[in-house]
Image (tube, rainbow, N blue to C red):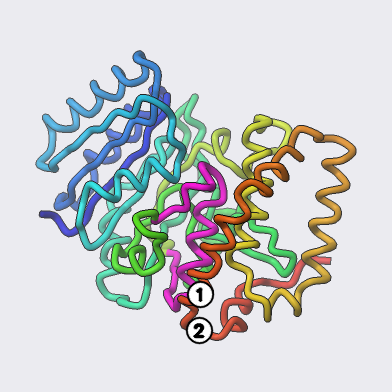
Amino acid sequence: MATLTVQLVAWNGAMYYPHLFASLRKQTAKDWDFVVVDNGSTDEAFAALEQDVARFRASGSQRVRVVRNAINRGFAAGHNQAFALSESVFVQLLNQDTVLAPDYIARCRAFLDTHPTTAAVQGALCRWDVQRDVRTDTVDSMGLRVDRSRNVTELGVGEAYGSVAFSEVFGVSGALPMYRRAALRAVAHGNEIFDEQFFSYKEDVDLAYRLRSAGWKAHLVPAARAWHDRTAAAHRRRGSRSAFERRCSYRNHLLMLLKNEHGKTLRVDSAPLLWYEGKKLAYLLLAEWGTLRGLVDLWRLAPAMVQRRKEVMARYRVPPEEVRQWFVKTAA
């Protein structure tokens, strides 16, 4: 068994597969297994995925396993399904809308090999124009940034690659993270690494909170480069996101706070948090009534989230103030 598993949850991504799989074939690291979960794609998209998987099998030495779901189970459940199919020490997650530099996997794995208290790493993700296959030097994500209002954004967005020199970060983006399996198991809810109540959106932030509070670290490995199609990214302009995306994102942000926010830090930062959430609510009341359906979801899911909150609080291994140090002051 390889010590690393690369796992892809795919959904109707035929336009991306040739680029992604070509970058996987060029990886300098070869000792890894590959798990692909198709999350209810159309028959045409699944056929395209099978073709690229077949070419990948023919050109490499990796063991490949493909699972097809009848329905879209969401990002969280799809990756949990893939997690359960391997026992490797490290796990590299793939977004279908990414391409990796040849040494991406090798660099991330080398960092985890030599930093035993680090649970998660990511490389420098830059923007990718998939239509023209142009790979830019404009940063898409250097990790997760949280401010005192608990607004979560991507570090370094829009800046030039090379001008940002972060190392340790609060947490890593779900687009292309590598995790230490022992750390994931230490903060899992039963068999769920990602919380399946979230379905999609903010599950990477929720996991980052759980790892941080349990005493694990997260790092950026800037020399590991990859490219991400920003048009498909969750942090693109609000107006271009579907009603379903906006509803899930709003609901999941509140679920994340309910589940992870420690009482001590909540009291200290209650003013900026309430101000931010109040402004958001006012906007939704005026302009996005549909997004407020997320509050109905919140009411329905709150009892289960309260139970999971008890697990999170019981697993705290650092002072809450140590987690709060990552919540930067909001710019004026």
* Residue range (magenta): 193-220
In this picture, is 165 found above or below 65?
A: below
Q: Secondary structure at mark 1?
A: helix
In the figure, is residue 301 to the left or right of 238?
left
Q: Earlier in the sequence, mark 2 or mark 1?
A: 1
Q: Position of residue 80 (x, y in %)?
A: 36, 48
**For the point 47% across and 33% down, which residue is it?**
134
Q: Nearer the viewer, residue 48 or 195?
A: 195
Residue at 18% over, 26% down: 55
- The quadrant of the rendering that contains the N terminus is bottom left
Q: Position of residue 283 (x, y in %)?
A: 86, 44
Farthest residue, direction top: 44
Q: In the image, what residue occupies the spot 87% across and 40% down?
A: 285
Residues at badges 2 and 1 in contact (C-beta under 8 Å)? yes
Check residue 122 for magenta coloring.
no
Q: Secondary structure at mark 2?
A: loop
Image disc number at residue 213: 1
The residue nearer to you, when weighing 332 against 77, is 77
Crowd rating for badge 2 (residues with CA inside 10 Å; few <14, some 14–19, many 20+): few
Residue 110 x %, y %: 26, 66
Q: Quadrant of the C terminus?
A: bottom right
Tag 2: amino acid? Val
Whether residue 73 is visible, yes or no, is yes
Q: Nearer the viewer, residue 112 or 261?
A: 261
The residue pinned by badge 2 equals: 318
